[in-house]
Image (cartoon, rainbow, N blue to C red):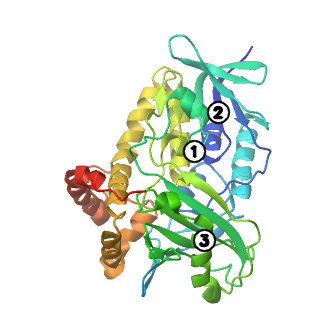
Amino acid sequence: MDACDVVVIGAGPAGAAAAIEAARSGASVTVFEKAPHGRDKVCGDGLTPRAVRALLDLGIDLAPSHRIDGLRMIAGRTTRELDWPGGRFPAYGGVWPRRRLDAALIDAAAEAGAKVEFETEARPVIDGAGRVTGVRAGERTIEAGLVVAATGAPGEVARMLGAERDPDEPFGLAIRTYAETPRHGDRLIEACLSLSDAEGTAVPGYGWMFPAGDGTVNIGVGALSTMKGFRKLNLNALLDTYRAQVAEPWQLGPYLERPRAWRLPMSAVRRHGPGWVAVGDAAGLVNPMNGEGIDYGLESGMLAARLFVDDPATAPERYDRVVGERFDAFLATGRRFSFLIGHPLILRTGLRVAVGSQLAANITLEVMGNLVDTDAGPGGGGVSGRVLRVTDRVLALADPVLRRTRAAG
C-alpha cells in the first residue's frame, strides 16, 4: 500500500492548481488523470482577468495564450466594447485552448514534484466511519491525508462522496468548435447576449466568439436549464443559427472539428467531508451568468492545498467555510437570476437594461468577467458589488415565486 500527503483525482485546472500549490509547499502529491497527457477538454477556452491573476500566482507563463483586453457585448441592435477595468485583477484576460493550458498546468505540477499518472482512473476509499482515507487505482490502494476531487461535472466520484449537483438548482449546457478566421488576432472576446433558436425563441444564455490568436476562433453557445423547452433544445442547431449571424463579420471558414457539448454544473450538495474536498466544477463553482469556472477552479484548488499544508486536520471544514465566504453569495444570486431570465419577456427586458447605459454595461462586464469582489464585506465590491447585494435581496424575496413559476423544461 502506497501513501502520500495529497491525492488529486483529475488533472484539469483545479486539480493541477491544488497539486502545484501542495507540491511547492513540500507535500507529497499524486495526481490521477484518466485521459492521456495533452487531452482536449471541451471548453470556451476564455481566461478572465481573475483567471490570469490566479495563473500568475501559480507562476505560469502566459506567453502561449492570446491576450484579450476586453469584451464586446451584443444585445439586439446594441453593441458595446468595454476594456477590462483593472484594479484588483489584471487589465487583461486571454484565450488559451484547453489542450495547451491544461498541459502547461499539469507539467508545472510535475516540475514542482507531484507524481502524475495519466490514463489511470482513481476512486475514493471510504472507511466504515465515512472518512475518505485515500484512493484505489486499479489494483493499488494509495492512502492520503487529503483527497481532492477535481473531476469536473458530477460523475461516479461525486456520487460516492455525496457531492452531486443539487437537483433543485439550475445547470447549463454548452457546445463549441473552432473555425478559421482572419480576425483570430482580435483583442476582444465577443458575447451575443440576445441568443435565439431557429424558431426565434429567446434563449437564456449567450453565443461567443473567442479569438485564439492561432488562425482560429472558438465559437460556441450556452443555455440555462431554466428556459422553456430546455429538454428539447438542439445545441447543434442553436450553434448553426448563431454561426449564421457571425459568419460574415468574422469571415468564418467551415468548422474545423465536430462540435462537442458539455454540461456546466452550477451547484453541489456537498463540497467537503472527512478526508476530502471538491474543487472547481466538482464543487459547483461555475458562474450561472456566464458559465465560467476556470478562475474559480484555480482559486479553489490553491486554497484547498494551502489550508491542508497549514493544518491537515481542519482543512476540509475550513475550505468549505472560506469557499462559502468568497463565492456562495455571488453564485446564489446567479442561480436566482437564472430562474428570472428563464421567462422570455423578463429576459428581453433584462437584456435592454444590461447594455442600455454605460453604467449598466460596466456592471454586466464585471459580472460576465467574474470580477465582482464577493468577499469584500458589506461595503466592498464597488458599484457592482452594491448593486448585486441589492439585487440579491430582491431576488431572495422573489425566489419562491420564481421557482414555482419556472419555465417548464
- x 41%, y 70%: residue: 365
Q: Is residue 68 visible?
A: no
- x 69%, y 48%: residue: 105
Above or below, 280 relative to 243: above
Q: Measure how far apart labels 3 and 2 are at the Cα level.
A: 37 Å
Q: x%, y% of residue 17? A: 61, 43
Question: What SS does tag 2 mark?
Answer: strand
Q: Which residue is mark 1?
A: 153
Question: What SS does tag 1 mark?
Answer: loop
- Please indicate whether residue 268 sits to the left or right of residue 21 in the image: left
Q: x%, y% of residue 318? A: 42, 30
- x 73%, y 54%: residue: 40
Q: N-terminal of the two: label 1 or label 2?
A: 2
Q: Which residue is mark 3?
A: 237
Disc 1 crowd rating (10 Å Cα; few below 14, some 14-19, many 20+) is some
Q: x%, y% of residue 216? A: 72, 74
Could you say which quadrant of the image residue 44 lies in? bottom right
Query: In this rendering, which labeled residue sits more in front, label 1 or label 3?
Result: 3
- Please indicate whether residue 249 sits to the left or right of residue 121 in the image: left
